[in-house]
Image (spheres, rainbow, N blue to C red):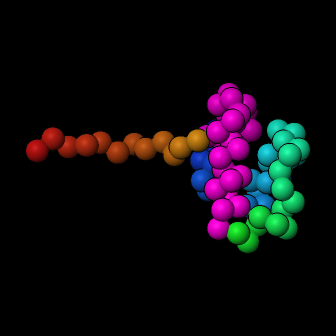
């Protein structure tokens, strides 16, 4: 199963996962943050408080894995 980087989540998806899956109950109301510049950043920062194993169990990861190779000059 490929993990989804949290940066690919929209505001409502991130909110639903934090509140529903992880039980984070001290979030501001979705209506007050979904159209704010800081709202998405705030929600994504809350994922950083969670154990990586819990994120993986939910199919999420913090960063996107890359398969790029750096070529030496």
Residue 29, placed above or below residue 68: below
Measuring 35% from the left and 45% from the top, which residue is drawn there?
68
Left or right of 26 in this view: 66? left
**Can residue 29 be found in the magenta stretch?**
no
- Name the spot of residue 42 as percent of width and height, x first: 68, 53
Left or right of 48 in this view: 58? right
What segment carries the magenta color? 37-61
**Can residue 47 be found in the magenta stretch?**
yes
Secondary structure mostly seen in magenta is helix
Residue projecting furthest to the left = 73
Q: Can residue 42 be seen in the rendering of this structure? A: yes
- Name the spot of residue 13 as percent of width and height, x first: 76, 57
- Name the spot of residue 38 as percent of width and height, x first: 66, 62
Left or right of 4 in this view: 15? right
Left or right of 32 in this view: 49? left
Residue projecting furthest to the bottom = 35
Quadrant location, the N terminus: top right
Q: Nearer the viewer, residue 27 or 44?
A: 27
Across the whole image, how many numbered discs are drawn on residues?
Answer: 0
Measuring 59% from the left and 47% from the top, which residue is drawn there?
5
Q: Which of 21 and 41 is in front in this view?
A: 41
- Name the spot of residue 44 as percent of width and height, x first: 66, 50
Q: Can residue 21 be seen in the rendering of this structure? A: no
Quadrant location, the C terminus: top left
Residue 3 occupies which quadrant of the picture? top right
Measuring 88% from the left and 44% from the top, which residue is drawn there?
25
């Amino acid at each position: 199963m490929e993990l989804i980087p949290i940066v690919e989540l929209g505001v409502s998806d991130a909110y639903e996962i934090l509140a529903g899956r992880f039980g984070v109950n001290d979030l501001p109301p979705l209506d007050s943050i979904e159209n704010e510049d800081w709202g998405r950043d705030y929600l994504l920062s809350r994922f950083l408080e969670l154990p990586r194993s819990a994120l993986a169990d939910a199919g999420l990861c913090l960063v996107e894995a890359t398969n790029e190779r750096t070529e030496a000059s």
